[in-house]
Image (cartoon, rainbow, N blue to C red):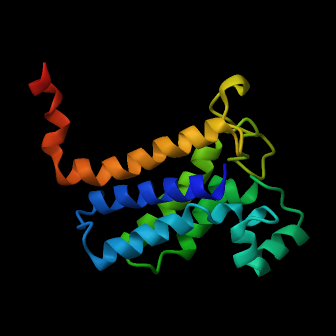
Amino acid sequence: MLQKTHSIAGFISAEIVLISQDISFFSWDAAGVLLLGCLAGTLADVDKPGSTMAKVLFPLSALLRLLKIKHRTLTHSLLFMLLLGMIAMPLPPLFFWAFLISYASHPLIDLLNERGVELFWPISFKIRILPKFIAIDTGSASETGFRWLLLVVSLLVPILHLFPQLLHVGQYLS
C-alpha cells in the first residue's frame, strides 16, 4: 500500500483511540494524537528504500539496509511491534496507544496485499488475508478505491461519535 493509504489508516486508528479514551475531537490532545496516527501509520515502511519514512529516518533506514532487512519483514512483525511498545512506554497513555495502534494498522492493511507480510518474523512465512485474485496491489485502482473507503470511514467515525442518533436514521425512513 502507498503512504497515503497507510496514513489514513493510522488516522482512523488514532480516532478510535480518542473515542476509547473519551477525548474530545476539539482539543489539542486530539490534534496531536491524529497527527501522530498519520505518521505512525506510515512508519513501518522505513524498511523500503525510497519511501518517505526511509528518507526522513535515513540513519535507521540505512541500518536496516546494511543488516539486509527486507521490506515487510522485521518492521511489519509482531516482534517489532512489541519492541516499539517497550520503547514507547514513557509516553502518556493516550499517545502510547495512539502510536502503537496506528503503527499496527500498517501491517494489518498490508495483509490485504498479495505479497503479504512476515508477521512472525524472523520466521520466514508470509501471511495474507485475501486470495491473490482479489488482493489489493500497491498503487492499483483497487488500492485507490480502498483508500477512498478509508477516507469515508475517517469522516464517519467522528460524525457518528458526535451524533450517534444518525445511526438510527434508517428506522425513520421505512
| Residue ranking furthest to the top | 174
Which quadrant of the structure image shows residue 152? Answer: top left
Kindly identify the residue that appears in the image at 50 percent across and 58 percent down.
10
Which quadrant of the structure image shows residue 55? Answer: bottom right
- Residue 159 percent across, percent down from the top left: 25, 51
Which sits in the foreground, 45 or 50? 50
- Residue 173 percent across, percent down from the top left: 13, 24
Kindly identify the residue that appears in the image at 55 percent across and 68 percent down.
39
Kindly identify the residue that appears in the image at 71 percent across and 38 percent down.
137
Does the image show residue 13?
yes
Asked if residue 58 lies left or right of residue 78, the reply is right
Quadrant into which the C terminus falls: top left
Does the image show residue 112?
no
Which quadrant of the structure image shows residue 62? Answer: bottom right
- Residue 66 percent across, percent down from the top left: 90, 71
Asked if residue 26 lies left or right of residue 85, the reply is left
Which sits in the foreground, 137 or 84? 137
Looking at the image, how many numbered discs can be counted on the residues? 0
- Residue 11 percent across, percent down from the top left: 45, 59
